[in-house]
Amino acid sequence: MPRMLIPLLCLAIVSQPALGDDRSVQNDEWLKATLYGSDNDAAALSKAGVFKEGEKRKIYIHSQFKFLCDLELDTRGQPSILSNCESKEPPRPLCTKPDSSCARANNCLKEVPEKNPACLVRWYVKEPQITMSCFQTKSEDICTGKYSLCTSRGFCDAAEMKVAKRRTTDRTRPQSLARAEEHFSWEGVYEYSESGETVTGVKFVNAGRTISVKRLSDGTYTAEVTDFGRMTFGDIIVCDVRISNSNRKMALFYKGIRRDGTNSLEKKTGEFMSLTRVPVKGKERFIPEGNFHPEALDPYFEKKP
């Protein structure tokens, strides 16, 4: 018996790293892909997003009830469990007219807008967690989970949460992009601008960041970052740049900050942020990580032509 156990133990030890590497790649796919989904069968497919909040992953489905949930992935890197789901859709008044039978029967709309909590309808997920089941088509990865959609008035109905993504991996990238990858130059201007709606439903505009990257004579890069709406207007962050061996990621490290109206450089060190190149529909997006706090659900930079 001991002689039989040793080969099996060795096999388990040798196999585990490969599994872990594959899972890491798949996890990245769901974090960086363009997602869409719905929070009930009657709702149209809408934008969705996966992001990290501390050590937790969150998923937000911008559908009818705008649910924000904690997300757990399975060993294959696919959505497995949604928990602590909270609707970000503002509560709606139970009654719409002060002199209606609804208002009189429920003692609502004594003032406009409605402020009585008993006269405001909210939505929630009855179950503490939703178990997701995933399947693939030729072009999509799709995950669904059954749950009970309830209102604060006590009504519940069966519903289904759905999230999906297009199957765009390095294996399916156009060969033209793959051939050009090693010749890609990071020199240029990268722009990010937010416009639309936040996960909390608040409208916003004009909070942008621009990264200007220059290639030096020795083949290295340097960068300057301007950030409108999040730093003092006119400040410039000067960065040293490091490119990954695969030429897929650019990391920016603080060199210093040039304050508005001055030429002197206020010294600062440490990693600032990074951009990762991700192919989407034959083009490339640049996904930010690190010292970057977007309000948008699917943040990315684009390189100016």
Image (cartoon, rainbow, N blue to C red):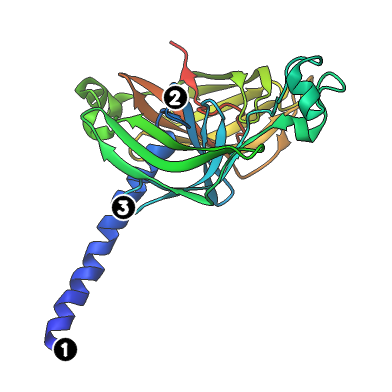
Q: Quadrant of residue 29?
A: top left
Going by the numbered disc 2, the residue's amino acid type is Ala
Is 251 in front, or is 176?
176
Q: Can residue 244 be seen by looking at this rendering?
A: no
215 relative to 108 in the view: left or right: left
> Of the residues under marks 1 and 3, which one precedes in the sequence?
1
Q: Can residue 145 be seen by looking at this rendering?
A: yes
- In the picture of the structure, the residue carrying the numbered disc 3 is 21
Q: Secondary structure at mark 3?
A: helix
Closer mark to the observer between disc 2 and disc 1:
2
Is 115 in front, or is 171?
115
Q: Quadrant of the C terminus?
A: top left
Going by the numbered disc 1, the residue's amino acid type is Pro
Res. 2 mark: 1
Residue drawn where x is 17% and y is 81% of the image:
6
Q: Tell me how far mark 1 sits from mark 3, CA to CA.
A: 30 Å
Going by the numbered disc 3, the residue's amino acid type is Asp
